[in-house]
Structures are given as structure tokens and as C-alpha cells.
Image: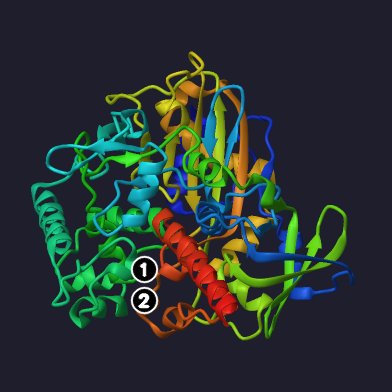
């Protein structure tokens, strides 16, 4: 189709400001309430007119906040309230649903639990994701929750190939360099420091403290690759895709330690799945959001914007705006879990700072289709990537759903806005209307799938202005993150950005860790 071919050329050239979609389809822009969130910068909140009390106040209902709430509930502590700005809890793991399927709006999988991810493994057992263990001690996963085959494919030179490492049209010399690179990454995956820890682990702070490994955090992944003689263009494009996929940041701005971590840290194993398998559902990590919230739904309040925290000798006072009623009230709590990104935490509590914390914006489109895309050489996979595109490609929401509506599907298309510095990308994103967003996603989709012309039923887009922490050089093992990890009572911080990577494991462990500290603090207060 002519429009699709033109879109491919524009995307390849880097012109990402298309005006209109190939044809008009329904849709809307969703996302965090930026107008309310930005009030933290300007102030002007209505005066406090009421007061409430709670034992523990949890500010933020993403994975970290929900993990904290679940941990408190499981410990038998129910005197808490979780306050969330948006209309639903979930943060970057929120999901949606229509008459075709449930679908993710953000995070859509979790890798197999690693040896170090003891808390995540325990959660997987509790939720029935891990159903038992074999004679060798390997976990057995629920097969309906493991990413179904075919798992990944790549669009390259006008056709699809199996797997995400480019093979079509790749020279023998390039293949040899890919092999050498992956051999190096596998070697990093087996390395341990003098402290006995893996060089690269999940969670991040379970990794070795050896200076030899941590020194990799001082340079970019691109520079490290070039220094090691990894210079093939296609290899750099592949690694750049991987960094943008996990960190929303190009490999020329990603710490080499973080870039290597992507390949070397996923050491989880299963009795009934390969090491590259992932745990996923039609709604992505929204499935986990729903399970984490079970049992504490009545203590979750949405539409609540915390705008000031004052620490006091025996607790905290938190001023909150009810965005629905337009009124402010004060919560007096004995302790608080601050489960929000650091740049927000720094605005709520003056003694905190967000120096060194940088966040990547993202856009995600959910495209409802009247038919399933064709394969062009490969069967439709769960994860479908276009080589060399600034967009990341799409996952098929119905791929995991045995009850899928015949002939229809939902594709979740991801785009990390790493083509500009984060602040500029956020401004560009806020200025784009729904037709402009639809144009960008549909131009590429119809270029690689011209058979879908006329079958697009709807395109909705969600914009995350501060989607994930950027592990730029010097951040993961630098002073800014080290300071942020030093929580001081009565306020305990919890968020994935404290781990330096926006992954489920970091958020979950951070949340239960902060909740545990809050309980210990309360126990100390009672004893005192």
C-alpha cells in the first residue's frame, strides 16, 4: 500500500511527526493525570478542612505500593490506607479490556525467577504461577502462564524471521561477531565476584560489589562495545533495541553495566520451560496488579494527590487533595511508605532530593483489529519486532488467551520516546493529538502488514511522561542512588527507581522491604 510504504520511509528517516493516520479510526489518549501531577510544582491547593488517622499511609499504588499493602495484610496488619492519584492502582503495570481481549498498557511480562529473587519466587508460589518443584529442585510453572510458542520474531528485509537476533542478509563476519558478543554475555552471566555473588543479579543490589564489575557503570554500553571490538552496525542496532526495550534509553546513553545486565542477569530456570521463557498473561502485568490488590481493596483510595508531608516526633502529617471532590484533608499516620518516583518524593518531603534521577517517557498503543495479522514466512508470535525501527514492535494480547474471539485480536504497540532528550520528548508527547499518535503507529503497522488495511477497529494510546528510571552511566552504583536507599523513619521509600531499573522484581522487593521496615519501626515505638 502506498501510504504504508511512505510511512516506512519516514520512520526510517527519523521523521516522527506525521499529521494524520492513513484513515480515520476511533480512539483516545489515556494516561496519568499530568495536570493534577504538575500541581505539585505550582502549588495552590485548597486549604485542609478535615483530618483522618491511619497506622501506615502508603503513598502511590504502583507495584511497590501494592506490594507494601499486601505485605502488611499478610502480616496481619490492617491499619493502613493506600492513596493513589490515578483512577486505578497499577502504575506502569495497568491494563485494559474490551470485547476482544484484556491487554497491557505497560509492563507485560516477568522473566523466570532467579536464584536471588527469593521474594518473587515466594509470590509466584502463593499465586500459583509456580505449582511445585521437580526432583532436581527446579520450579514447575503453570504452563498457561508461560509465554506460548512462537515467542519472538523479527521483521527484516521485508519478511519475518524466527527470534530477535537478525539472521536474514547478515554476513558470515557479522554472524561471528554476534556469536562472540553473546558468548561474552553468557560468560558475564556465570561470573561471580570475590564476595560470592553473581556479577549481574536480579534484584540489582544482590549483584557483586566487586569494583571490577561496578566500573562498567562509568561508561556507556556503546562505548564499551566499541572498546571491546564489537563494531558491527547490526549488532549495535540489536543492542540499542534491547536497551530501549528495558530502559527506554538508547545504548549510547545507557550504562554498560545496565546494558550487560540485560543479557547476563536473567538466570532463572524452570523444569518445564527454557531459560528465555517469560511469565505473561493477556493483560500483561495487570494480572499481577489484580492479585496484589486482593484482600486490601477497601483500603485503596484512588483520585488522591498527596502534596505535602511533614515529619513529626511520633509520626507524619500528610496533606492530600481529593481530586474528585476538589477538597484537601490531612492524614495523621504513625509511619509512611512513600511508593512514588523519586522526583515526586522530593517534592513531598523537603529533605529528599532527586539529583541524578532521570526518567524516560513512553507511548503505548492498543490496536483492535478485525483480523489477525499474517506471517509472511513466520507464524504470528507473541512478541513481534521491526528491525531498525524507533518503535519497539508489538505483543499480541490474545496470544495467551485460550478464549480469544475468533478472527479478532488486540496488538499492544510500544514506543520508548528516546529519539529526543527526555524533557523535549515529554513536551512533544503532550502536544500530539490522537490522530498524530495513530498516524505513527498505523504507518508502521500497515507497512509491515498491508493486509490489515480496513480492518483496524480502534487505536487508543497511553502516554507515560516518566515511565521508567534511566540507568545512565554512573547512576546504578553512584552516590545519588546510594543516598536514596538510606530511608530514615518515620518515612520509608519504595519504588523501582531505587533499584535503577524499572522491572517488576525491583518494585516488588522495594515495596515489601519498606513495609517490613515500617512494621519494625512501629514495633520499636510500642516497645519504647
Q: Position of residue 3 (x, y in %)?
A: 53, 33
Are there few (<14), some (14-19), or many (20+) residues within 10 Å of tag 2? many
The answer to whether 480 is drawn above or below residue 339 in the figure is below
The answer to whether 12 is drawn above or below residue 441 in the figure is below
Q: Are marks 1 and 2 in contact (CB under 8 Å)?
A: yes
Depth order, front residue of 121/34: 121
Q: Position of residue 508 (x, y in %)?
A: 45, 57
Are there few (<14), some (14-19), or many (20+) residues within 10 Å of tag 1? many
Residue at image location 24% in from the left, 78% down from the top = 209
Which structural element holds mark 1? Answer: loop
The answer to whether 10 is drawn above or below residue 253 in the figure is above
**Residue denoted by label 2:** 473
**Residue denoted by label 1:** 254
Rounded to the nearest angstrom, the CA distance separating label 1 from label 2 is: 6 Å
| Res 221 seen here | no
The first of marks 1 and 2 along the sequence is: 1
Depth order, front residue of 432/519: 519
Amino acid at each position: 500500500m502506498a501510504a504504508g510504504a511512505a510511512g516506512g520511509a519516514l520512520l526510517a528517516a527519523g521523521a516522527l511527526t506525521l499529521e494524520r493516520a492513513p484513515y480515520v479510526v476511533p480512539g483516545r489518549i489515556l494516561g496519568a493525570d499530568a495536570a493534577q501531577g504538575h500541581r505539585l510544582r505550582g502549588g495552590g491547593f485548597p486549604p485542609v478542612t478535615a483530618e483522618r488517622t491511619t497506622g501506615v499511609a502508603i503513598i502511590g499504588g504502583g507495584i511497590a505500593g501494592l506490594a507494601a499493602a499486601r505485605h502488611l495484610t499478610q502480616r496481619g496488619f490492617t491499619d493502613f490506607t493506600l492513596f493513589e492519584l490515578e483512577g486505578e492502582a497499577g502504575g506502569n503495570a495497568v491494563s485494559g479490556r474490551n470485547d476482544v481481549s484484556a491487554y497491557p498498557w505497560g509492563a507485560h511480562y516477568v522473566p523466570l525467577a532467579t536464584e536471588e529473587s527469593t521474594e518473587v519466587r515466594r509470590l509466584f508460589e502463593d499465586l500459583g504461577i509456580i505449582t511445585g518443584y521437580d526432583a532436581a529442585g527446579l520450579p514447575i510453572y503453570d504452563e498457561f502462564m508461560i509465554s506460548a510458542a512462537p515467542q519472538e520474531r523479527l521483521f527484516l528485509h521485508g519478511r519475518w524471521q524466527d527470534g530477535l537476533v537478525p539472521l536474514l542478509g547478515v554476513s558470515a563476519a557479522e554472524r561471528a561477531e554476534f556469536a562472540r558478543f553473546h558468548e561474552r554475555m553468557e560468560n558475564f552471566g556465570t561470573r561471580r565476584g570475590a564476595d560470592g555473588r553473581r556479577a549481574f543479579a536480579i534484584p540489582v543490589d544482590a549483584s557483586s560489589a566487586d569494583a571490577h564489575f561496578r566500573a562498567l557503570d562509568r561508561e556507556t554500553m556503546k562505548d564499551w562495545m566499541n572498546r571491546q571490538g564489537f563494531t558491527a552496525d547490526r549488532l549495535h542496532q540489536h543492542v540499542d533495541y534491547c536497551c530501549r526495550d528495558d530502559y527506554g534509553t538508547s545504548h549510547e546513553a545507557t550504562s554498560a553495566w545496565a546494558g550487560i545486565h540485560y543479557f547476563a542477569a536473567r538466570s532463572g530456570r524452570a523444569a518445564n520451560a527454557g531459560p528465555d521463557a517469560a511469565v505473561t498473561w493477556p493483560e500483561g502485568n495487570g494480572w499481577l496488579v489484580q492479585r496484589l490488590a486482593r484482600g486490601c481493596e477497601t483500603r485503596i483510595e484512588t483520585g488522591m494527590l498527596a502534596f505535602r508531608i511533614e515529619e513529626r516526633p511520633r509520626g507524619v502529617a500528610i496533606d492530600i487533595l481529593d481530586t474528585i471532590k476538589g477538597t484537601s484533608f490531612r492524614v495523621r499516620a504513625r509511619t509512611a511508605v512513600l511508593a512514588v518516583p523519586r522526583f515526586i518524593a522530593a517534592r513531598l518531603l523537603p529533605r529528599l532530593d532527586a539529583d541524578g534521577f532521570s526518567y524516560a517517557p513512553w507511548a503505548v498503543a492498543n490496536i483492535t483489529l478485525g483480523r489477525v495479522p499474517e506471517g509472511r514466512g513466520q507464524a504470528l508470535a507473541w512478541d513481534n519486532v521491526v528491525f531498525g525501527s524507533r518503535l519497539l514492535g508489538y505483543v499480541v494480547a490474545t496470544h495467551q488467551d485460550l478464549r480469544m474471539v475468533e478472527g479478532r485480536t488486540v496488538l499492544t504497540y510500544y514506543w520508548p520516546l528516546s529519539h529526543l532528550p527526555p524533557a523535549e520528548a515529554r513536551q512533544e508527547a503532550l502536544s500530539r493529538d490522537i490522530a498524530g499518535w495513530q498516524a505513527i503507529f498505523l504507518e508502521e503497522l500497515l507497512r509491515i502488514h498491508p493486509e490489515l488495511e480496513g480492518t483496524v477497529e480502534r487505536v487508543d494510546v497511553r502516554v507515560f511522561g516518566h515511565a521508567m528510571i534511566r540507568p545512565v552511566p554512573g547512576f546504578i552504583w553512584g552516590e545519588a542512588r546510594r543516598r536514596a536507599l538510606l530511608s530514615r523513619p518515620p518515612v520509608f521509600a519504595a519504588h523501582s527507581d531505587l533499584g535503577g531499573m524499572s522491572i517488576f522484581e525491583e518494585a516488588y522487593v522495594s515495596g515489601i522491604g519498606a513495609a517490613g521496615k515500617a512494621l519494625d519501626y512501629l514495633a520499636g515505638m510500642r516497645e519504647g
